Amino acid sequence: MAMVFINKAILMKYAHSMTLLTLQQLVTALLIHCGRVMGYTKAKGLNIATAKKLILVSLFYNANVAFALASLKGVNIPMYIAIKRLTPLAVLVAGFFSGKARPSTQVTLSVILTAAGVIIAALGDFSFDLVGYSMALTSVFFQTMYLVLVEKSGAEDGLSSIEIMFYNSFLSLPFLIFLIIATGEFPNSLSLLFTKGTSLSFLMILLLSLVMGIVLNYTMFLCTIVNSALTTTIVGVLKGVGSTTLGFVLLGGVEVHALNVSGLAINTAGGVWYSYAKYQQKKNRPPKLVSDVESHRK
């Protein structure tokens, strides 16, 4: 929940979103590598065969973050969160086409209700920005693809969340460096970063963004491996209750309309319903021990 507000806050001070993403991935790769060398993590070293398997995860992840950051420039916080809540529906459809078991009626209906809330809320959004909405919807597509691939990688290849996170960051760097050069962000973005670095408030927000980004990615990959891609996305709907409420009063850019509020309420209700349906499913299932791969290695 905090990450959305931190990203919005830093983009207000520093608009070069791709440079920020490159910096985050560089710091992540270096931290995990140093942690492995110093014995703080049991993650395996770089393997070319594994890297080839995960290159699509990395590309989809970075495309998701890049389009999400770009959309925040034109979409207010409550609507951004609502649009991103279309991801569970996209994951549900992707799972159907990839041959996964058909979800229960309650799960399906709750996801559809979540998506319907987004459409209603969008009808009442006075600050509608076509480019911003397009960016956010494209981000939903890429988030769906990389979460489905992360779930598959954790289940089939036995990779831990830290290992997937390391490969994701390492493989992202060449692509991101090429992108910031090709789009003209570099070297202006770097010189502006050094200039802004003289401000303590900017440095605090930047550091917070880097740390929170790393923590968020780790917990997200871990949740996807231990649970499923659909559960990871729907849990995001629940945290969106607080984000949506705060988004109406913080950072500005929101004009309230009855349709907007009604749609967001329906959207949230769908998320709560999904969580209840999944809880009921788990309660009726025999207990099953599932843990992160890395915990078995310790």
Image (cartoon, helix red, strand yellow):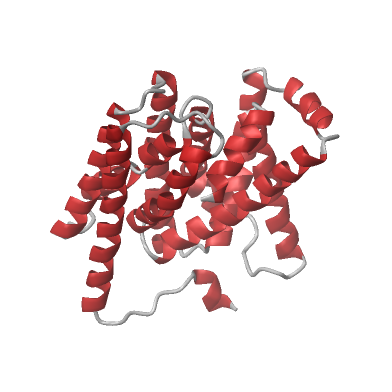
Residue at the location (56% across, 76% down)?
Answer: 297
Q: Is residue 61 left or right of residue 113?
A: right
Where 159 sits versus 88, above or below? below
**Where on the picture, by quarter, is residue 123?**
top left
Q: Is residue 286 left or right of residue 33?
A: left
Where 180 sits versus 283, above or below? above
Res 103 visible: no
How many marks are shown on the rendered structure? Answer: 0
Res 255 visible: yes
Where 281 sits versus 223, above or below? below
Residue at the location (46% across, 41% down)?
Answer: 56
Q: Residue furthest right?
A: 198
Quarter of the image where the C terminus is located: bottom right
Give percent across and percent down for residue 179: 61, 26
Q: Nearer the viewer, residue 74 or 264?
A: 264
**Where on the picture, by quarter, is residue 118?**
top left
Q: Residue furthest left?
A: 105
Residue at the location (46% across, 39% down)?
Answer: 248
Residue at the location (50% across, 62% down)?
Answer: 159
Give percent across and percent down for residue 16: 65, 27
Give percent across and percent down for residue 13: 69, 30
Q: Nearer the viewer, residue 255 or 58?
A: 255
Give percent across and percent down for residue 291: 45, 74
Q: Nearer the viewer, residue 192 or 168?
A: 192
**Where on the picture, by quarter, is residue 216?**
bottom right
